[in-house]
Amino acid sequence: MSNFIFILAQAVAGESKTWLDTIQSGGLVGYVIIALSVIALALIVMHLVQIRRSALIPDVHLEQIDAMLARGDVNGALEYCLDPPNVSYLTRILSAGLTRFQKSAFGVFEIKNAIEEAGEDQTAKLYRSTDALGVIGSIAPLLGLLGTVWGMIGAFEALQHGATPDHEALAGNISLALVTTLMGLILAIPCVSLYRYFGNRIDALASEAAMEIERLVLHLESGAGPQASARPASSVPRPTQPAPAPGSSATTKPNDGNKK
């Protein structure tokens, strides 16, 4: 037993081994974890660039659309949102609402429903883009456990060959068992943490976008736009009274009280 503990300590904390040697001792499972680490790093950088206010709710878009809707230029605001260089989380949601506003006779009443549907769809897409990072964070410990079981099986196989097992083979299997567990945890902890961070970040930006869009929609509800302009009262024709029928009381002359 003391010999087993000595080999274990030598395999894990050997001063002559570098970090590269330790990683290489993880075997095939270790290389798979390293490949997932590279993918996770690329996803983290991509999400840091995409999930930020300047990318989802650009101030320049807010200013331009607010100015157009304030003067009633719904067509200009819609064209601005649909222009490919201006595509963002904000313009995708607004374009759906403005399209419904123009095409429907009750657009001013349906615009909020259209914006809510588009907002839920765009927010769901942002959540789905972070799913890969969550999956990597979930399977990394399982891969480490797989390497642990694999290494321990090899260690016990080396022990069963006799009273004096091959110390080098035993140390290699123990190193495989512990290194893969370590690598899996090192990968899983930041992935799970950042997955939750990006989810909370999406929630915060979606709430902020909802408030900004509600402020922009107020221009339409206050009378800007083609559907909101009512006809003046003087131009509405009044219903004509039907002509009285001949012989009715309305056509007879009033009785003269002095006439006998």
Image: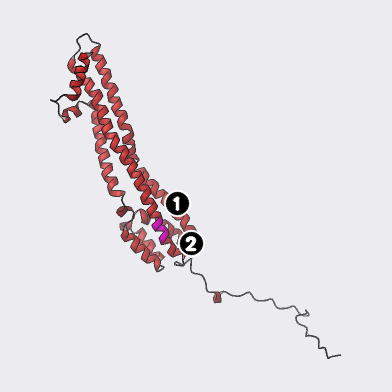
Q: Is residue 113 visible?
A: yes
Quadrant of the image occupied by residue 252: bottom right
Which portion, as a residue range, is magenta? 211-215
**238 or 71, which lies in front?**
71
Q: Pointer 1: residues within 10 angstroms few (<14), some, or many (20+)?
A: some
* Amino acid type assigned to the residue bearing label 1 in the image: Glu
226 shown above or below 207: below
Look at the image and say whether residue 212 sits in the magenta stretch. yes
Quadrant of the image occupied by residue 132: top left
- Image coordinates of residue 135 in percent, x first then y, are 34, 36
Q: Main secondary structure of the magenta part?
A: helix
Picture residue at 25% right of the left edge, 36% below the top: 37
Picture residue at 28% right of the left edge, 23% below the top: 148
Picture residue at 30% right of the left edge, 49% below the top: 50
Q: Residue 108 carries which label?
A: 2
Q: Residue 117 carries which label?
A: 1
33 shown above or below 154: below
- Image coordinates of residue 33 in percent, x first then y, are 26, 32
SS type, badge 1: helix
Q: Pointer 2: residues within 10 angstroms few (<14), some, or many (20+)?
A: many
* Amino acid type assigned to the residue bearing label 2 in the image: Val
